[in-house]
Each structure stands twice: as structure tokens, then as C-alpha cells.
Image: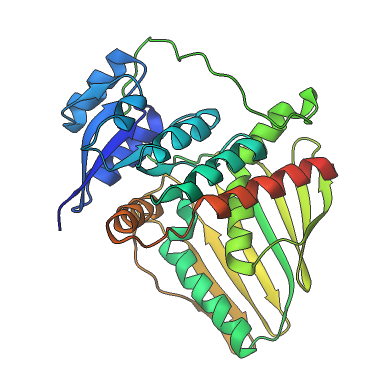
Amino acid sequence: MSKLKIGFVGAGMMAQAVHLPNFLSLPDGEIVALAETRPQLGERVARRFGIPRVVESHLAFAEDPDIEAVVAITQEFLHAQIAIDLLKTGKHVYIEKPIAGCVSDGEAVLRAAEESDKQMMVGYMKRYDPGVEAAKGLIDSLQESGEYGSVRYVRAHCMGGDWIARPLEVMGTDEPYPPMEPRLPAWLPGDQAQIFNHIRNVYCHNVNLLRHLLGEIQSVEAVELRFPTQHFTFQFEGFRAHLETGHLAHGDWDEGLTIYFQKGQVEIRTFAPLLTQSPAQVTTLDSSGTRTLRVKREWAFWRAAQHFVECCLTGQPPRSGAADALQDLHIIEQMFRTS
């Protein structure tokens, strides 16, 4: 099988520290060009990672018949236009979460994805975490067998601190960022823009993970946005879930969720996102005691990259596609309408 020829958009911190090393390590993929609007940074990063060609715009990839897929690691307000431009010209596309800055832009991405015969994946890497995959299988099995009874309540939290949790060697230049138009919901009050951006960019992971593990959110029941912590209550089919978010100044990263069944519980603890080889820890508790599941020690970001390349080569749809990612934006906008 020939290698998937990939064009890569963006040369910032996340590209250098996470996505370029991961995609370059895959045996079935090959990064053949880098697009970066800051020419000096683009050249420096390309030399470091051995990428043979540098261009200034993702549009160069749209016109290149040799490039089959594009990975775009950019600011979230650029996600929609980049994805639409590339899907319309027959490229597979991988973007970071969220799918867009607002629902209307996300809907445009979904339309482009549905009109294309190419793969569109949004990088919700937690879905590809070995621990989360094991937890998903366990939860589905428990619900099917009824061994623990029905779900009664779910408590999720993300008290974010040091999300990097390791030394990084990242190159930079004094080149300015290109001008960019914020893409926010038209109805959103101006004084909520900052907190909306934060919730959408950081805690969309937690909304997505709740939906992935437990099914669709039926409604948003309650919202508290006051600093320094935020609280959200969601109604699922037959039970409620509560999400607590905030920031830890001492630098730790405390994130996870607990699913309380009638006869037992499942706890999932996820670690700092950039901490490599640290999959989620999954623990069960019931009348027989406590048990921790054994899972592979692989990085969720790497597994997400691997999944995208596999989907492009086989035609298998990605597990975090455009329609699913758009649902997160619908929920997050509903959270702010409820507030």
C-alpha cells in the first residue's frame, strides 16, 4: 500500500510539539509540504522536521494533485474556511477541535463534508485514548448486561492547570500573526465572548467525552458561569450529569468523570493532554471491591493521527467526524443560551 501524501498547515507550538512528530512517525503517511503564513517560521520548522516544501497558504494544497490529505493545526476561527476550501477540492481533512467558532460555521463544514467523498476528522484525541476506549467498551457492556443496573448519576470535572506537563523545545520568530476575524455566535453578548471562547476551546473535550461514553445530551438543565469555577447540568436519557470546570493555580491537572450505577461505579481519570504515554486510568468499584483496568501505554494524540491516516487509506469513516463535532457546538451554544 502506498503512503498517504499529507500537506500540513500550521507551524506553531501544537504543530511542533504534538502533531508533526506524530504524523511523521506513521509508516503509512508522508508529510510532503508545510503551509505557514509566517515564512521564516515555516522554513525553520520545515528544516527541523525534514519537510521538503514550504508554502504560505493552505490554498496551495487545494491546487496540488499530489496531496491527498491535509492536517490543519491552526487557530479555531480558521478551522471552517480551511476545511471547506480543502474538502471542496477533494482532500481528506483533519482539524483540531472545535470544528469551528460557532454553529453556523460548523454547519457549513458539515455540508462541505457531506458533499465530498473524502474523510473529515476533528481531533478529539481523548476518544482514541486506550483507557477511554477500554472504558467505552466496559460501559457499553455493563449497560447491555445490566450487571450494575441503570446509570443513576454522572459527575465530570476538569480543573485544568499545567496541560503540557513536560519540557518542550519549540521554535518561534518575531513575525506577527496574520489578522484574523473572530467567528462567534451572532446572538452572543459581547461580555460573554471571552468565557465562551474558553469553554468552547477547552471543555468541549468534556462535553464530547460525556456524549461519547453515555449517549446524546437531551437538554441543558442548569448553568453557572461565575468565576472562578463553572457548573453545568445536563439531562441524558434516564439520568443527569454534572460538569465542573475551573483552573488550578498550583499547576496540577485534575480531570475525570465518575459514572454511578445502581450497583457499582466506573471512574475515568484523564491526565495532562501533552503528557505522552499516559493513558486514562479506569477503575471500577462494586460489592466485590476495586479493580483497575490494564491498557496500552500509548499517547491519545498519536492514536488519533494513526486513525485518520487509516481512514483515508481504507475509506472507513472517522470516529470523530464533522456531524459529531458539530453536536458539541450545539450543546455549548445551548449552555450559554441557558445561562
**From the viewer's perspective, is residue 289 above or below residue 277?**
below
Quadrant containing the C terminus is top right
**Residue 44 occupies which quadrant of the picture?**
top left
Residue at 35% x, 53% y: name it: 308
Coloration of the structure image:
rainbow
Task: Tell me residue 256's x, y (percent).
Answer: 59, 58
Task: Tell me residue 75's x, y (percent).
Answer: 49, 29
Residue at 67% x, 58% y: name it: 156
**From the viewer's perspective, is residue 229 above or below residue 128?**
above
Horizontal side, residue 65 vs residue 108: left or right: left
Count of numbered badges drawn on the protein: 0
Camera-side residue: 112 or 132? 112
Residue at 37% x, 18% y: name it: 37
Task: Tell me residue 238's x, y (percent).
Answer: 78, 74
**Does the rendering let one see residue 250?**
no
**Does the rendering let one see residue 134?**
yes
Residue at 53% x, 41% y: name it: 109
Camera-side residue: 328 or 152? 328
Horizontal side, residue 121 vs residue 15: left or right: right
Horizontal side, residue 71 vs residue 283: left or right: left
